[in-house]
Image (spheres, rainbow, N blue to C red):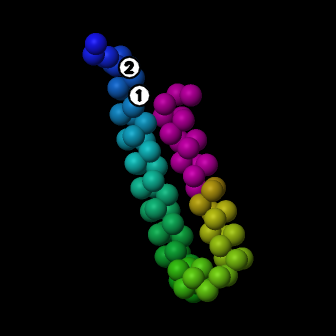
Amino acid sequence: MQMHLPDFFLGDLVATVAFGLVSILLIVVGYIAFDKLTPKLDFDDLLNKGNMALGIVVGSFLLGLCYVVGRVVAAILGT
């Protein structure tokens, strides 16, 4: 017995994967832009040294960026 997936499921699956990949790309671009806009700070070096304050700032920035990207995707999908 072969199981057939409904067409709407495959369409939603493709949309989810596509929006997920675009979202990850936008978050990476946002991090790179944030890194370039603050040239006095070497994020990678300071984070490797265990600078917790910078880790909290960068983490907060990424969470905020993820929220914005999520809202944009939700607006595009109409939810």
Mark 1 falls on what kind of element?
helix
Percent of width and height locating residue 33: 49, 69
Mark 2 belongs to which amino acid?
Phe
Estimate how packed mark 1 is, as few (under 14), some (14 to 19) or many (20 or more) residues with alpha carbons within 10 Å: few
> Quick check: 57 above or below 25?
below
Q: Which residues are magenta?
A: 65-79
Q: Residue at x 52, y 28 (%)?
A: 78
Single out the residue that lies furthest toward the right. Answer: 53
Mark 2 falls on what kind of element?
helix
Tag on residue 8?
Answer: 2
Q: Residue at x 35, y 34 (%)?
A: 14
Q: Is residue 66 left or right of residue 56?
A: left
Depth check: give the residue in front, 1 or 9: 1
Q: Quadrant of the C terminus?
A: top right
Disc 1 designates what residue? Answer: 12
Give the spatial CA distance, label 2 vs label 1.
Answer: 6 Å
Estimate how packed mark 2 is, as few (under 14), some (14 to 19) or many (20 or more) residues with alpha carbons within 10 Å: few
> Quick check: 20 above or below 1?
below
> Is residue 22 rendered magenta in the image?
no
Single out the residue that lies furthest toward the left. Answer: 2
